[in-house]
Amino acid sequence: MTAPSQPTWFKSSYSGGSGTECVECAYTATGTLIRDSKRANGPVLHVATEPWLMFVRSVTHGAPR
């Protein structure tokens, strides 16, 4: 999958409609961007693909023990 030149931001399907405490993500060619949805021009965190997938798996299925 080729990442667009401008990131396409999306919110989690678990985000509430109240506009509080939400993050947005955007996929890139090298990983995932994460930002505070209330501060679109604020700092952006880049997480490489493999660590991001490990994080999502642990949240989805529980951390390995």
Image (cartoon, rainbow, N blue to C red):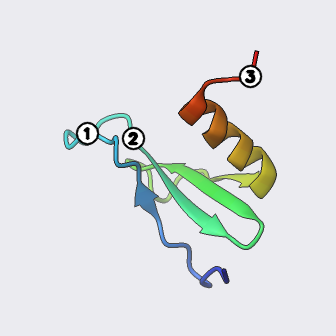
In the image, what residue occupies the spot 40% across and 48% down?
12
Q: Which mark is residue 22?
A: 2
Viewer-nearest of discs 1 and 3: 3
| Residue 46 occupies quadrant | bottom right
Q: Secondary structure at mark 1?
A: loop
Give the side of residue 23 with respect to residue 51, left or right.
left
Q: Which mark is residue 64?
A: 3
x, y percent for residue 17: 20, 43
Viewer-nearest of discs 3 and 2: 3
Give the side of residue 37 with respect to residue 34, left or right.
left
The residue that mark 1 highlights is 16
Q: Secondary structure at mark 3?
A: loop
The earlier-in-sequence mark between 2 and 1 is 1
Nearer the observer, 43 or 16: 16
x, y percent for residue 35: 53, 50
Q: Are marks 3 and 2 in contact (CB under 8 Å)?
A: no
Going by the picture, which residue comes out furthest to the top? 65
